Image (tube, rainbow, N blue to C red):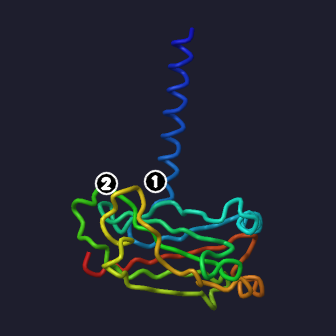
Amino acid sequence: VRQLERTVSLRDLSIVEMEGKMREMSASTYDGIFIWKISDFTKKRQDAVAGRAPAMFSPAFYTSKYGYKMCLRIYLNGDGTGRGTHLSLFFVVMRGHSDALLKWPFNQKVTLMLLDQNNREHIIDAFRPDVSSSSFQRPVSDMNIASGCPLFCPLSKLDSKNSYIRDDTIFIKTIVDPTGL
């Protein structure tokens, strides 16, 4: 009986792992363009203000099927110089299956956007990686140190205009320039 219980538990664990991988795969994109939908914004922001969940990671996305693996990290109540005043948004290079085939350091232009859901005034920031930074070297752990914009969007701007937050949801868009890949 104990052996059967262990077998069932291991199978249940395998199913949970596979479901997680399926969710990740369904959320992934393979063209360097990723739109992250963050729903339940009010609750998530309250959790950030209270310190319960200061940061969130997006699902992983890729520049191509065998390309760079990346994700975003967002602080809904800011981080560092933006804590309490700004939404902070960061780009993270992750360890991927094809890293041995890729050119390092990562050197693609990255564009980060908070989408205005009336399609008028997106908040946009773009940067080209500092190739001397460890954030853009070939990852030796699951994720490199995040790099990006601690002062991405003033919280006052987010609160004063209801076109960034609609139906308690925001959208973050990332474009990784494919030039040279």
**Residue 97 coordinates in the image, percent (x, y):** 31, 54
Tell me which corner region of the image, top left, top right, bottom left or bottom right, holds residue 46. bottom right
| Of callouts 2 and 1, the N-terminal one | 1
Provide the residue designation for mark 2: 97
Q: Is residue 17 above or below residue 143?
A: above
Horizontal side, residue 66 vs residue 92: left or right: left
Q: Going 66% across and 73% down the picture, which residue do you hit?
A: 170
Q: Going 69% across and 81% down the picture, which residue do you hit?
A: 164
* Disc 1 secondary structure class: helix
Q: Residues within 10 Å of mark 2 (few under 14, many from 20)?
A: few
Nearer to me, 118 or 91: 91
Q: Residues within 10 Å of mark 1 (few under 14, many from 20)?
A: few
Instruction: Find the distance from the CA under tag 2 to the CA under tag 1.
Output: 14 Å
Which dot marks residue 180?
none
Which dot marks residue 25?
1
Q: Judge depth for marks 2 and 1 and give the one in front.
A: 2
